[in-house]
Amino acid sequence: WILSRCRLFMPALSSLKRDLTDTLQSLASEIDRSVDVDQFRSVSAGIARHEESIESLCDSLAVFEETCSALTTPLSSVAERIGAKLDERAKLNEQRERLRLLQRLAQTLHHLESLLDRPPAPEGAGAAEALDDLLRAAREMGRLRILRERGAEQKLRAVRPGLERWERVRKTLLRKLTDSLHAALAAGDEARAARVVLGFADADASAEATHWLRSEWVAPRLVPQLKGAVARGTERDALPRICAEVLVFARGGAFRPLRAAALADPQRPLHLLADSVWAEACAFLKGTPHLFGSLAGTPAALHAAHTATVALQAKLEALLQTPAERHYFRCHPAGADLMRRFNLPIYFQLRVQEIAKQLEAALARSDAAADTAEDGDGDGGGGGGGGE
C-alpha cells in the first residue's frame, strides 16, 4: 500500500524538481546580467593592492614611532638644560640691574658730594654759578631718593651702609638751601627765592622748607605784630585787629617773594601761605585762649570776630594762584580747628535768646499799649453817660 501511494506522488516531485532547476538557472542568468564580473574583479584587485599599501604605511609608522621614542629622552634632557640656562640668564640679568642701580647710586652720591664740597663763591657772577650748582645738587638729591627707594624695594644690602653718608649729604644740602633762601628773602630777590624754594621741592624737602619758613622767617616777624595788635585795645575786639595784621603781613614785602608766579606749579604745590602764615596765625590764636573767652556772652563781639576771620580766609585765599592751593587752604586743619573755637551753636543760642527777649519786650509793650487804649475808651464812655 505504501509503495502504491508513493508511486502516485512521484510524477509531482519530478515536475517540482524541474521547476526549481529552471528557476535557479533563470536567477543565475539574471545575476550574471546585473553584476559586471570584470568590474568586480578589478575592485577586488584594487582592494588587495590598497591593503598592501596600508600594511606598508603601518610598518613605516611603526618605524617612525620607534625613532621618535628614541629621540624623546635626549630632547627632554636638552629642554631641561635650556630651561636651567634661561633661569640662570634671568638671575644674571637681575644681578646686572642691581649692580647698575648700585653704580648709579654711587655715581649720583659722588656727584652730589662734589657739588656740595665746592667753596662758597663771592657775590656776583660767582654767586649765580654757586646757586646753579646748588640747584643741580637738589635735583641730584631727588634722583638719589628715587634710586634709594628702588634699592629698598629690591632689598639691596649694599645700600644700607651708605645711609649715614646720604643723611650727612642731605643735611648739608638743606643747610645750604636754607642759607640761600634766607639771603634771597632778606634781599627781596623774588626770582632767586622762587628758584631756591623749587630747589627744595626738587630735593623732596618741601616739608623742611615750609618748616623753616614758618619757624625762622614768618614767626619772628608776624608774632610780634600780632602781640602788638592784642595790646592796642581790649581783648574783646582783638581778633579783628589780629586778622588785619595777618593780611598786612601776607601782602607785605616780607612774604611777597614767596607769592611769586613761578611757585604756582600744579604738579608741585608747595602751600607756603597755608603752612606758614595761616598756620602760624592759627597757632597764635590757639595759644591765646583768653581771646575767645572774652567773647563769651557777647554775641555782637563774637559775630564781629567770626566775620573778620571769615573775611581774612577769603582774602588770603584770593592771594593763591591755583585751584589745588585754594582747596588745600580751605581744608587746612589749623583753620578748621580755629573755626571750631567760635562755638557757633552757643552763639546761635545766644542770638535766639536775644531775639526772643526783644520779641517778648515788643509784645509786652504792644499788650500794654492795647490795655491802655482799652482803659482810655472805657473812661471816655463812662464820662459821656454822666453828662446825660
Image: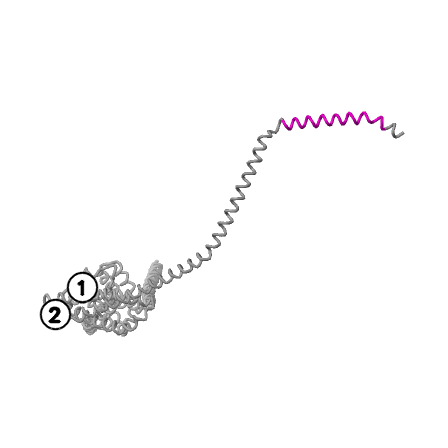
Instruction: Give the tally of numbered discs.
Output: 2
Which residue is at a point 54% across and 39% down the rendered structure image?
50
Percent of width and height locating residue 182: 17, 70
Q: Is residue 375 above or below residue 176?
A: above
SS state under label 2: loop
Label 2 or label 1, whichever lies nearer to me, is 2
Q: Nearer the viewer, residue 159 or 58?
A: 58
Going by the numbered disc 1, the residue's amino acid type is Arg
Which residue occupies 62% across, 26% down?
Answer: 33
Determine if residue 275 is in view: no
Q: Which residue is located at x 46 percent, y 57 percent?
A: 73
Q: Residue furthest right?
A: 1
Residue named by callout 1: 195
> Which of the 4 image quadrants contains residue 177?
bottom left
The magenta stretch is 6-32
Mark 1 crowdedness (10 Å alpha carbons): few <14, some 14-19, many ≥20:
some
Camera-side residue: 320 or 314? 320
Q: Residues within 10 Å of mark 2 (few under 14, many from 20)?
A: few
Q: Amino acid at mark 2?
A: Ala
SS label for mark 1: helix
Front residue of this view, candidates 372 and 272: 272
Residue 35 pos. (x, y %): 61, 29
On screen, residue 269 versus residue 48, left or right, reads left
**Residue 277: which quarter of the image?**
bottom left
Q: Is residue 249 magenta?
A: no
Placement of the N terminus among the 4 image quadrants: top right
Residue 196 position in % (x across, y down)? 18, 66
What type of secondary structure mainly makes up the magenta span? helix
Residue of label 2: 121
